[in-house]
Amino acid sequence: MRDAFLSISCALALLIGTFSLRADYTLDLDCASFRAADSLGYVEVYTAVQQAGLRYKVVGDSLIAEFKVSLDVLQAGNVVLSDTFHALDARTETEPIDGQGSFYPHVFRLIMKPGSYALRAHLLHWDPQPVATAACSLRVPQPTGDLSVSQIELGTELSYTDDGSVFVKHGVRMIPNATGFYGTQIPVLYFYAEAYELDYDSQRADSHVVVRKVLDAETGAPVRPEQTGVRPTTGSSVVIVDGFPTATLRTGTYYLELTVISLRSGRSATMRKKFWTYRAADLAAGRNLQNQPEFGSRLAEVDPNFLEVVNADSAERWMRYILTRDEYRRLRRLTPEGKRQFIREFWEKRERDDPGAGNRYFARIVEANRRYSYLQRPGWKTDRGRVFVLYGEPDRVENNYAMPQTIDHEIWGYDQLEGGVFFVFADRQGFGDLDLVHSTKRGEIYNPNWEQRLRTRDQTLSPSGPFSPGR
């Protein structure tokens, strides 16, 4: 049985090479559930903090980046578990700090009851406001008496050891890859899984078969020869670890599929895990990813030339916040190739004075979708998403939730816009979707009575602090 722990880890995370991510995407999150004793689940939550997005300070003759990742586990909207990981990166002033191509992995280890959960992680630096947020869902299955396969952990390195590292379980050391990306820079995908309720009798020799498939996520067709191995059954539960090269896979979205078959009874169980591969040469050669919108969003995280591969129809929709009415009408009438040329020329003009503006804009679209999506509405279409896309990360966020005098609301402050402006978002309907009700930014909604819109029945809001009216 694995021991549960919810403690604060104070150690420097291992630095792993991966893709060149921009600072807009400093945090990735993934998870896998395995079986523990007493019908409980052993859950590992994997995070990857991109070194390129860390903030360094000069301390003496060194450069210091101190950061932490806080994890919340929610069920039915309530936080049921929390944990925090602390790390420190120190280097001399002569060492490079851009960190391109590297991330810090970590594993949170939890014991949880069966059920469905939401995971939310925040990356924090020197101040208390998160600089990045990531979220995903988790299902801890109820154990049954039938053959089953655990969820799959993806990794970048695999070895065998019995040391006490958080990366080790059952004698296997796996460095997790929370990004899910592989390709020319991470040429081998390693994986870890467990199978349960195999036919096992200590008085006889039993075997099981492990079938590994790699499938195109769009078509379901296999893209590599099926791998089948017969293995001795050494217990009712076994560990499955292996790896395969990914550099030969074309840029796109794939599934790793594992099937375990017990030879004595013929019972079988299957589990899948999605992953991505990226080769810049494929896109340069004209690889068409129009039917893989999820990959297009993920690609915004890893490709410094996203403008060359972004789907033209998607870009048309996303750019409506910054185009004039005439520009938007003209763009909509163009052919796909005409749209791509329009988009290229539009950003070339802007990037003469603001290099990288196009990539930053589309990166904010993807981040807004991560943070602010609500029901069937993508995050970039929400009020908070629109403001985030247009103006970037606020300097300060004041969260006002579960307050007796006011409805739930957030106040965002931008110190560098027009000498200092703020935006007020309120949950007017009470369903968790916040609308913009007031801003001091020119051209945005202005309501001098915005405080009254936040008050609950027979209550008033007393302004105070840096976001008071008149700021």
Image (tube, grey):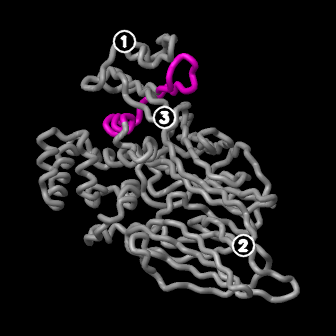
Q: Image quarter for residue 297? A: bottom left
For residue 470, which numbered disc appears in the image?
1
Q: Image quarter for residue 284? A: bottom left
- Which numbered disc, 3 or 2, marks the residue that appears first in the sequence? 2
Magenta highlight on residue 444? no
> Compared to 14, does 387 lie above or below?
above
For this view, does 220 lie left or right of residue 154? left
* Residue located farthest toward the right when viewing the structure as drawn: 203
Q: Position of residue 98 (x, y in %)?
A: 44, 49
For this view, does 22 lie left or right of residue 115? left
Q: Label 2 is placed on what type of residue?
A: Asp
- Which numbered disc, 1 or 2, marks the residue that appears first in the sequence? 2
Q: Label 3 is placed on what type of residue?
A: Phe
Using the image as rendered, state which of residue 343 and residue 99 is in the foreground: 343
Q: Which residues lie in the magenta part?
A: 383-409
Magenta highlight on residue 395? yes
Residue at which label 3 appears: 431
- Which numbered disc, 3 or 1, marks the residue that appears first in the sequence? 3
Q: Are marks 3 and 1 in contact (CB under 8 Å)?
A: no
Q: Residues within 10 Å of mark 1 (few under 14, many from 20)?
A: few
Q: Position of residue 426 (x, y in %)?
A: 44, 27
